[in-house]
Image (spheres, helix red, strand yellow):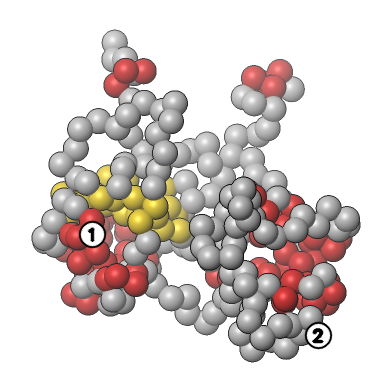
């Protein structure tokens, strides 16, 4: 217990989990709470549906987010705010109500329903899609954070993932022989760095592609010529997220580092 307290009170890599829910019951609760009045789900018809829902569409969302994300969004709508028309009030807070009267069972059921909303093949933000549609640049605040070191790259694309069981050696061999030269052949790609955060329970591996500028990043992601190398890369890894930013996401802080 002393060691547990010393490392922050939770086991290494710990993440909260919900009890198993019933997707069918969650769908009924989703409808009873009036969620379809704001959120569209393609192919679904609800009693509380409105012609023009104003919240984010939830079609296929189970393919993109883990269950804990849905639970957090329901319990605390301000945890992730979408800066879009009609999503925020005048104070910059989410217009989604907090469902603080839900039971744990109802929450687990609704999360199970949302997690079940999957597409057969999730849309890719990798090569082959129009460049302007494939990438949304995200601003990373650096308030109270050491600045990143100087780098020739000015735009970054990050992918966090877990390597599929038993595939690490194959992945490394493929990257050395095929992946690295194929990626580096792209105009404007300056760096490829992969980091491992062993304290994370999942998506512990992050690869960051650094580009000369945003235009080079958009051109690279929209180039059908890189579709095959992305397909091969993704064949070695599990479900993953993506983020495009104007600053590095992970870097060493020299002002707080030392070497003996």
The answer to whether residue 35 of the structure is visible from this angle is yes
Instruction: State if disc 1 and disc 2 touch (CB < 8 Å).
Output: no
- Density class for disc 1 (Cα within 10 Å; few <14, some 14-19, many ≥20) is many
Give the foreground label among 2 and 1.
Answer: 2
Q: CA distance from mark 2 to mark 1?
A: 44 Å
Identify residue for label 2.
47
Examine the rendered structure and indicate whether residue 217 appears above or below residue 149.
Answer: below
Identified at 53% across, 65% down, the residue is 85
Q: Residue furthest top?
A: 260
Most extreme residue toward the front is 90
Residue 195 in sight here = no
Secondary structure at badge 1 equals helix
- Give x and y (percent) for residue 60: 57, 75
Q: Earlier in the sequence, mark 2 or mark 1?
A: 2
Residue 93 horizontal side relative to residue 243, left or right: right
Total residue callouts: 2
Identify whether 202 is placed above or below 232.
above
Which residue: 69% across, 27% down?
9
Report the residue marked by disc 1. 217
Please determine whether, in this image, residue 2 is positioned above or below residue 102: above
Residue drawn at 85 percent across, 74 percent down: 32
Q: Residue at x 27, y 45 (%)?
A: 193
Figure check: 114 above or below 156:
below
In what quadrant of the picture does the C terminus appear? top left
Can you give x and y, in whole percent of width and height, for residue 58 in the image?
A: 61, 73
- In the displayed structure image, the side of residue 71 where residue 191 appears, left or right: left
What number is the disc on residue 65?
A: none
Q: Secondary structure at mark 2?
A: loop
């Amino acid at each position: 217990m002393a060691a547990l307290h010393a490392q922050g009170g939770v086991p290494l890599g710990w993440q909260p989990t919900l009890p198993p829910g019933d997707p069918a019951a969650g769908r009924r609760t989703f409808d009873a709470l009036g969620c379809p009045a704001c959120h569209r789900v393609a192919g679904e018809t609800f009693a509380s549906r409105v012609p023009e829902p104003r919240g984010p569409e939830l079609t296929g969302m189970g393919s993109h987010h883990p269950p804990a994300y849905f639970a957090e969004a329901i319990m605390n709508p301000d945890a992730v705010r979408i800066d879009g028309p009609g999503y925020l009030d005048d104070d910059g807070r989410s217009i989604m109500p907090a469902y603080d009267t839900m039971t744990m069972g109802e929450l687990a059921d609704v999360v199970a329903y949302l997690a079940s909303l999957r597409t057969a093949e999730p849309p890719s933000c990798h090569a082959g899609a129009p460049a302007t549609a494939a990438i949304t640049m995200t601003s990373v605040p650096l308030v109270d954070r050491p600045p990143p070191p100087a780098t020739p790259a000015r735009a970054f694309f990050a992918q966090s993932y877990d390597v599929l069981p038993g595939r690490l050696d194959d992945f490394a061999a493929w990257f050395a022989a095929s992946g690295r030269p194929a990626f580096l052949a792209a105009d404007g790609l300056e760096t490829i760095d992969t980091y491992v955060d062993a304290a994370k329970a999942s998506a512990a591996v992050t690869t960051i592609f650094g580009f000369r500028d945003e235009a080079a990043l958009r051109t690279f992601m929209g180039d059908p010529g890189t579709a095959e190398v992305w397909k091969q890369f993704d064949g070695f890894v599990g479900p993953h997220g993506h983020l495009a930013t104007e600053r590095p996401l992970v870097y060493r802080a020299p002002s707080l580092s030392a070497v003996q």
